[in-house]
Image (cartoon, rainbow, N blue to C red):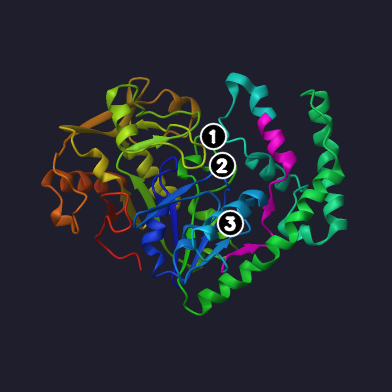
Amino acid sequence: MPALVLLGAQWGDEGKGKATDLLGGSVDYVVRYQGGNNAGHTVVVGDQKYALHLLPSGILSPGCTPVIGNGVVVDPSVLLSELSGLNERGVDTSKLLISGNAHIITPYNVTVDKVTERFLGKRKIGTTGRGIGPTYADKINRVGIRVQDLYDESILTQKVEAALDVKNQMLTKLFNRRAIGVEQVVEELLGYADKLAPYVSDTVLVLNQALEQDKVVLFEGGQGTLLDIDHGTYPFVTSSNPTAGGACTGSGVGPTKISRVIGILKAYTTRVGAGPFPTELFDEDGEALRRIGGERGVTTGRDRRCGWFDAVIARYATRVNGLTDFFLTKLDVLTGWEQIPVCVAYEIDGKRVEELPYSQTDFHHAKPVYEMLPGWSEDISKAKSFSDLPKNAQAYVKALEEMSGAPISAIGVGPGRTETIEINSFL
């Protein structure tokens, strides 16, 4: 039962799409298990660049079945638009499967997300405004709308009424907004039913049967470990579990069926949105990383905050996910620096701390302790093996591997599909 989990080991945007796509030719199913269209993957195939927001990266691999699991929240308009865009570019999307238990992002979820962020002002979380958080809140409050509800108008109407009973009170009395009509929402949601019907499936059954038949299933997380609702830098996190445990609950596949857990690490660190970021740079180096690395959010369009590699959060990701391997991306971006700082510990209230503090206050005040590693100036984008890399680049990778606590089994040396060095096979 070769089931693999592939997830972000930092704050997201590590290059999971490239890693998933690299495995796509050997994988039978690629499963998104959490998040929604607040996540984004960029995949480069030949001279074509694809920006995926909700769809699993495996949709670009012929022969692979892409799956949107029960743990995902789905905006039907975004999903159908993304499918249409890929179809226009000649990509076959007919194999897509969507869990009937996945929750729907409704128009009122998007409205609540946006007005709440504006209301919070300087205390805002930095959400994407796409309704993700309110949809997960509805799910926990048991007033959520699931994909399967689109096929029973009576149930759908009752659930929308229940959700809007409270939300309209909040919108009108707290935010001074107009109430949202039940009929309007129901009509819009029913309009998606026929278009989504060919894809809706019992994905829990499909995936477990696939594993029983020795098919290769890859579980693809959105965002990253430090954005996990339970294990991230709360409250500046997403509303789901991108960590490895989320792969099980978000797909209906048990933990005993997972064989490897692969963490994606960028050779430096980035973050989108508010929240603590110990190695963040506000100087020319930070701007250079942003420019050379093309650090702009695929989904949000926001510039990413940039900083040096943080080995403390890498070790933390290894621990909470049970990582068996790392895929190190964007090593090529660091070409040209004479010396490259790496954060090996934090200083908090004058004390050296080598593990991620559990206290939000301590992490907010953490200052990075750097170790300087020699850089390189040679172009590494054509490297096909580890030995092709400059000695200093090899030493940098080995140092990160030792600090992070799991072997680095692949290295990205450029944005292209083939610009990857595979040290150890993931399969």
Q: Amino acid at mark 1?
A: Tyr
Q: Mark 3 or mark 2: which comes first in sequence?
A: 3
The Cα–Cα distance between marks 3 and 2, rounded to whole angstroms, is: 32 Å
The Cα–Cα distance between marks 2 and 1, rounded to whole angstroms, is: 7 Å
Q: Amino acid at mark 2?
A: Ile
* Count of numbered badges drawn on the protein: 3
> Residue drawn 80% across and 23% down?
176
> Residue drawn 53% across and 58% down?
88
The residue closer to the viewer here, 236 or 349, is: 236
Q: Report the mark closest to the observer, 1 or 3.
A: 3
Residue of label 1: 234
Q: Which residues are magenta?
A: 95-114
Q: Mark 2 or mark 1: which comes first in sequence?
A: 2
> Residue drawn 11% across and 47% down?
391
Q: Amino acid at mark 3?
A: Ser
| Residue 108 falls within the magenta-colored stretch | yes
Mark sitting on residue 229? 2
Q: Is residue 268 left or right of residue 175?
A: left
The Cα–Cα distance between marks 1 and 3, rounded to whole angstroms, is: 36 Å
The residue closer to the viewer here, 359 or 119, is: 119
Residue of label 3: 84
Q: Report the mark closest to the observer, 3 or 2.
A: 3
> Residue drawn 52% across and 37% down?
300
Mark sitting on residue 270? none
Numbered disc 3: secondary structure: helix
Q: Position of residue 159 (x, y in %)?
A: 83, 50
Numbered disc 1: secondary structure: loop
Q: Position of residue 13 (x, y in %)?
A: 43, 43
Mark 1 is surrounded, within 10 Å at the Cα level, by few (under 14), some (14 to 19) or many (20 or more) other residues, namely some
Q: Is residue 93 left or right of residue 189?
A: left
Give the quarter of the figure containing the C terminus.
bottom left
